[in-house]
Image: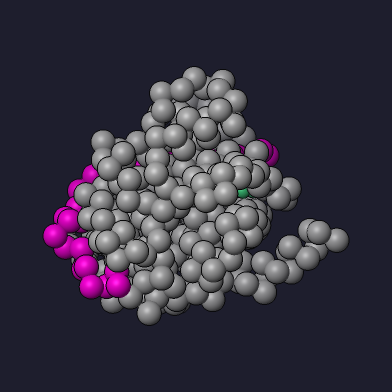
């Protein structure tokens, strides 16, 4: 049995921390360029495993010079890789410019030669062995199939709705717990950039059947609605010395999915997800700052003191 089974993106991130942006055509020496694993669901599953959950990844990985490193990192993190499918092609790459002075990250990524995950490659029986399914929109057809199967089995589906996709509406229709970034919601609803956060959540949730709908607003936190009680609640972001917010959203989703599998209330799962994402922001890259459960609890204790 897995606490969280993930279907979605795995990537290789090249992280480049700097104190100011380069100007065009400049040759700028930086202190270091670091490689870390990335990808929404991949990083979310690392968060699940660090927190002590049983995480498994069902996705397509390309056979290139990064494959060995990718598999070794999942092994180290105790993310199960028995259900990875390895195909010819290249793994997605991202170059991330981190402006340490404000903790922002600017991401350029390529999907060149990335093999696809076909819906008929989804291992239906595997989904039965998951308490929670976590998906993103990287392989939309595969995510749609996986989400349909999970729904037919009454398994909760958490989705990281971040990048617009033509299948978004259909996929969201199968998701019980929708956690979307502000940018996605603006695109999906067609609402104006200046729309108030409550109005955005109301409009977005009106278009969905999901029992839980949440929008994340970066360091402005998250706003969520529990449809069972019709209660809207805000989860402030924890204030930390942010050096890099890369992967904060991924970690938020992973932690939320894990605490949902542990049957935390929606408020408590959201609180822990925000704390986990904030811990991550204190270090460079999507993966290095992800806390263990002990570290997370210690962080929350210190924070509330
Ligand atoms: N600078 C920050 N400090 C503390 N918490 C943060 C910060 N940035 C993000 N978070 C936490 O992570 C959550 C998700 O972040 P965000 O809305 O930026 O996700 P995103 O848009 O999907 O971005 P990405 O997936 O690229 O990290 C926020 O609601 C907040 O709780
Ligand atoms: Mg995100």
Q: Which residues are magenta?
A: 99-128
**Residue 104 is inside the magenta segment:** yes
Q: Which residue is most to the bottom?
A: 1
Residue beneath the point at 61% across and 71% down: 292
**Residue 50 showing in the rendered view:** no
> Taking 167 as reference, is 232 left or right?
right
Asked where in the image residue 147 lies, by quadrant, the reply is: bottom left
Residue beneath the point at 49% across and 20% down: 192
Q: Position of residue 5 (x, y in %)?
A: 37, 67
Asked where in the image residue 129 lies, by quadrant, the reply is: bottom left
Residue beneath the point at 20% across and 63% down: 122
> Taking 44 as reference, is 145 left or right?
left
**Residue 20 showing in the rendered view:** yes
Residue beneath the point at 24% across and 44% down: 112
Is 100 rendered above or below residue 150? above
Q: Position of residue 80 (x, y in %)?
A: 36, 75
> Taking 268 as reference, is 119 left or right?
left
Asked where in the image residue 61 lies, by quadrant, the reply is: bottom left
Quadrant where the N terminus is found in the figure = bottom left
Q: Nearer the viewer, residue 298 or 3?
A: 3
Is 99 rendered above or below residue 43? above
- The structure's colour scheme is one colour
Q: Nearer the viewer, residue 5 or 91?
A: 5
Q: Which residue is most to the front?
A: 229
**Residue 162 is inside the magenta segment:** no
Q: Position of residue 20 (x, y in %)?
A: 62, 35
Q: Position of residue 230 (x, y in %)?
A: 56, 44
Q: Which residue is most to the right?
A: 305
Q: Nearer the viewer, residue 282 or 100?
A: 282
């Amino acid at each position: 049995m897995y606490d969280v089974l993930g279907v979605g993106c795995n990537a290789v991130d090249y992280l480049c921390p700097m104190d100011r942006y380069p100007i065009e055509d400049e040759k700028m020496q930086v202190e270091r360029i670091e490689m870390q694993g990335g990808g929404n669901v991949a990083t979310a599953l690392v968060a699940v495993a660090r927190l002590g959950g049983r995480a498994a990844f069902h996705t397509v990985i390309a056979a290139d010079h990064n494959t060995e490193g990718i598999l070794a990192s999942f092994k180290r993190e105790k993310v199960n890789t028995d259900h990875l499918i390895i195909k010819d092609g290249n793994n997605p790459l991202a170059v991330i410019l981190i402006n340490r002075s404000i903790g922002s990250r600017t991401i350029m990524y390529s999907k060149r030669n990335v093999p696809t995950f076909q819906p008929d490659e989804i291992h239906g029986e595997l989904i039965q062995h998951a308490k929670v399914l976590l998906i993103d929109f990287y392989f939309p057809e595969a995510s749609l199939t996986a989400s349909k199967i999970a729904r037919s089995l009454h398994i909760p589906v958490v989705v990281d709705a971040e990048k617009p996709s033509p299948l978004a509406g259909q996929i969201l229709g199968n998701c019980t717990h929708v956690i979307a970034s502000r940018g996605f919601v603006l695109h999906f609803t067609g609402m104006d950039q200046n729309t108030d956060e409550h109005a955005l959540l109301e409009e977005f949730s009106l278009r969905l059947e999901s029992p839980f709908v949440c929008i994340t607003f970066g360091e402005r936190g998250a706003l969520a609605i529990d449809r069972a009680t019709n209660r809207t609640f805000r989860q402030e972001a924890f204030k930390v010395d942010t050096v890099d917010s890369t992967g904060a959203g991924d970690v938020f989703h992973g932690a939320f999915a894990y605490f949902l599998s542990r049957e935390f209330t929606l408020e408590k799962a959201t609180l822990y997800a925000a704390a986990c994402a904030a811990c991550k922001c204190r270090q460079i890259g999507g993966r290095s700052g992800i806390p263990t459960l002990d570290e997370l609890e210690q962080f929350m204790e210190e924070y509330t003191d």
